[in-house]
Amino acid sequence: MESNANIYIYLTLLLVLLGFIFRKSKVLFTIDLIWQIIIGGLNTYCVDWEANEQIFQLASKGNGSNAFIYNWLAEIFKQYGLSFVSFNFWIYLVITLIIAGVILMFAQNPTLVMSYLFIFPFTDNIVQKRGYPVIGIMILGFAIYYFLKDKNKNQALVLFFILVLFSCGFHSSGIIFFTFIIYELIPKKYRLRIMIMYVIVGTIFRGSYSKILSIFGGSELSNKSDLYFNQLAATSTLGHFAFWIIWQCAFLILVFYVKKHYPTKFNLFVWNINIWALVILPLYSFNPVFARVFRVVMIFNYIVIANSFVVNKFKIIVSGFLANIIQLGLCCLSLYVFDISSSSVGFEQMILWIFENNVLLH
């Protein structure tokens, strides 16, 4: 089985390579999309499988969980005798199609974006069965907000608020996206300064996060609060905290570099949501688990960077080429630190298990 898994991994690497060559190919993009759905949607075992399956089995409309939409959907699936694997397939299919639709909407080099996505965070999204819907819903939320904000900003924020609520119905990590609404009410010229001040103050008073999360109520959030801000935080060090700050800021600086060379409306928007994403930085003092929120922003970053890869009359524009080389390096670094060198999990659990356990690929 392991040899077959290695073949599927090599096939994925081939698709990644082809994405750099045939950057605009809709055919290759479709193949990438189908392969993602096969690997992710038909997955039958991965890290945290037992815990997620137990949540599915215990899910009901009246169990008091904050993940009310997840519970409602799970109960419907169980009523029709469908398995946890079937449940995951349909959710993964819908969310992956949403993300693919947004990529096609904005990307000039969509297969290149898919290549970056394959490198990171493809397998992480498969593992996080309830977190993945939050990522897809909020990617859609930012895309809708982009199109509506200039016509009617209040209406755009209301729709964004509704989508945040909807995402919270799958996983509590959606809560942090409420802060984007507050951020958008700040005058543009003050946003960067206010976010820098927030990072400093938020880090100093990091002990307050647990109390703030508890305000939202519910036993599930209380348990999450203890997990994120006490149990996981026990392994955090100042060095780890500094690394994760540098890691995220590297993405921000890269988008800034591209924005300076290509100051399009979309690039300016993505730069803006990267500034908002600084809200995550103080949370890295507890654990890098909060990086899952940044994965929403990463998809838009990938689009911006991939769009900068321009070939004009067989000449490659240097600034865009350099940006994509750096982006490739950041993707590989992310894959290494999150999925290969992690002390709690590693290559076998985060990658090999994904390709070994599949309904279709035996």
Image (tube, rainbow, N blue to C red):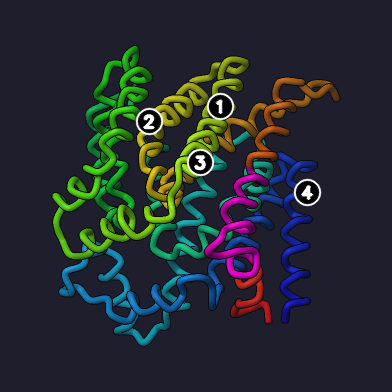
Task: Find disc 3 in the rendering and name its residue.
Answer: 239
N-terminal label among 4 and 1:
4
Judge whether residue 33 is colored magenta. no
Total of numbered circles in the picture? 4
Kindly report which numbered mark, 4 or 1, lies closer to the viewer in this rendering: 1
Q: Are marks 4 and 3 in contact (CB under 8 Å)?
A: no
Q: Position of residue 82 (x, y in %)?
A: 40, 83
CA–CA distance in space, label 1 to label 2? 13 Å
The tag on residue 276 is 2
Kind of residue sitting beneath label 3: Gly
Compare marks 2 and 4 and give the one earlier in the sequence.
4
Sequence-first tag of 3 and 2: 3
Q: Amino acid at mark 2?
A: Trp
The stretch drawn in magenta includes residue 349: yes
**308 relative position to 267: left or right:** right
Image marks 2 and 4: residues in contact by CB distance under 8 Å: no
Q: Which mark's residue is nearer the viewer, 4 or 3?
A: 3
- Farthest residue in the right direction? 314
Q: Earlier in the sequence, mark 1 or mark 2?
A: 1
* Residue 140 in view (yes/no): no
| Residue extent of the magenta highlight | 331-351
How far apart marks 3 and 1 lie (CA) works out to: 25 Å
Residue beneath disc 4 = 17
Compared across the picture, whether 145 is left or right of 2 comes to: left
Please state which of the two labelled residues, at mark 3 or mark 1, is closer to the viewer.
Answer: 3
Q: CA distance from mark 4 to mark 1?
A: 23 Å
Q: Position of residue 26 (x, y in %)?
A: 68, 47
Task: Answer few, some or many: residues within 10 Å of disc 3's Cα (few below 14, many 20 plus, some between 14 and 19).
Answer: few
Drawn side of residue 182 relative to residue 355, left or right: left
Residue ID for mark 1:
255
Image vertical order of residue 178 relative to residue 213, above or below: above
